Image: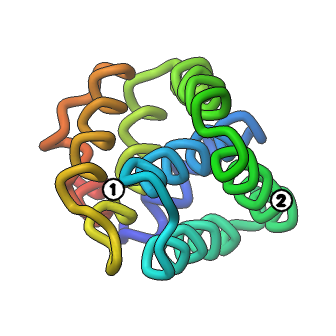
């Protein structure tokens, strides 16, 4: 099974809108960990959404809508929005494999140009702890899903 087939099967299993919301929420939380959204972070967020959109099981418009909503909420009131998005990640990543897949996608945002690597990495690790996925497992590239 090649990488794309493996990723497709993982996403098909979790194709509910809740899982997509959790992926986008985790990515947004990592991106905003340094207090704002750099152009590089926005580019990485858009890349994750484009990757999700490659799968017909996922409503591309909804994924983009969730991203816009989460960015607006975090920009307007981070103190209120961040805990709500965190709860969404925890609630929707109710299995280890869902959590691993969501965080592997979110890891793409860590270290984006214009971001503070230490802060985004710490947020990524904090999210890993919340859903009981070891950061070293979630940092593995998506091609590791084939193993």
Specify whether 57 is left or right of 10.
Answer: right
Residue drawn at point x = 52 percent, y = 21 percent = 90
Instruction: Using the image as rendered, state which of residue 123 and residue 78 is in the foreground.
Output: 78
In terms of secondary structure, where does tag 2 sit? helix
Specify whether 41 is left or right of 74.
Answer: left
Counting from the top left corner in percent of width and height, residue 74 is at 64, 46
Residue drawn at point x = 77 percent, y = 65 percent = 64
Is 12 above or below relative to 112? above
Residue at numbered disc 1: 107
Is 146 above or below relative to 133? below
Residue drawn at point x = 51 percent, y = 65 percent = 37
Residue 126 appears in which quarter of the rendering? top left
Is 130 above or below relative to 103? above
Specify whether 118 is left or right of 20.
Answer: left
Mark 2: give few (<14), some (14-19) or many (20+) Cα within 10 Å. some
Specify whether 111 is left or right of 29.
Answer: left
Q: So how many labels did they put on this image?
A: 2
Residue drawn at point x = 30 percent, y = 61 percent = 110
Give residue 30's mark.
none
Is 107 above or below relative to 14? below
Counting from the top left corner in percent of width and height, residue 98 is at 48, 34
Quadrant of the drawing holding the N terminus? bottom left
Query: How did the renderer colour the structure?
Result: rainbow
Residue at numbered disc 2: 65
Counting from the top left corner in percent of width and height, residue 77 is at 68, 39
Counting from the top left corner in percent of width and height, residue 51 is at 57, 72
- C-alpha span from label 1 to label 2: 21 Å
In terms of secondary structure, where does tag 1 sit? helix
Mark 1: give few (<14), some (14-19) or many (20+) Cα within 10 Å. many
Residue 63 appears in which quarter of the rendering? bottom right
Mark earlier in primary sequence (1, 2):
2
């Amino acid at each position: 099974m090649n990488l794309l087939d493996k990723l497709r099967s993982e996403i098909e299993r979790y194709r509910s809108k809740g899982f997509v919301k959790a992926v986008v929420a985790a990515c947004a939380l990592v991106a905003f960990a340094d207090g704002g959204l750099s152009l590089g972070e926005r580019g990485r967020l858009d890349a994750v959404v484009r990757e999700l959109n490659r799968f017909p099981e996922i409503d591309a418009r909804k994924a983009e809508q969730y991203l816009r909503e989460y960015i607006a909420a975090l920009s307007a009131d981070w103190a209120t929005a961040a805990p709500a998005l965190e709860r969404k990640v925890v609630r929707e990543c109710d299995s280890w494999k869902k959590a691993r897949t969501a965080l592997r996608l979110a890891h793409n945002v860590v270290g984006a140009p214009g971001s503070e690597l230490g802060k985004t990495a710490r947020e990524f690790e904090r999210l890993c702890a919340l859903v009981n996925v070891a950061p070293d497992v979630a940092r593995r590239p998506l091609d590791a899903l084939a193993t």
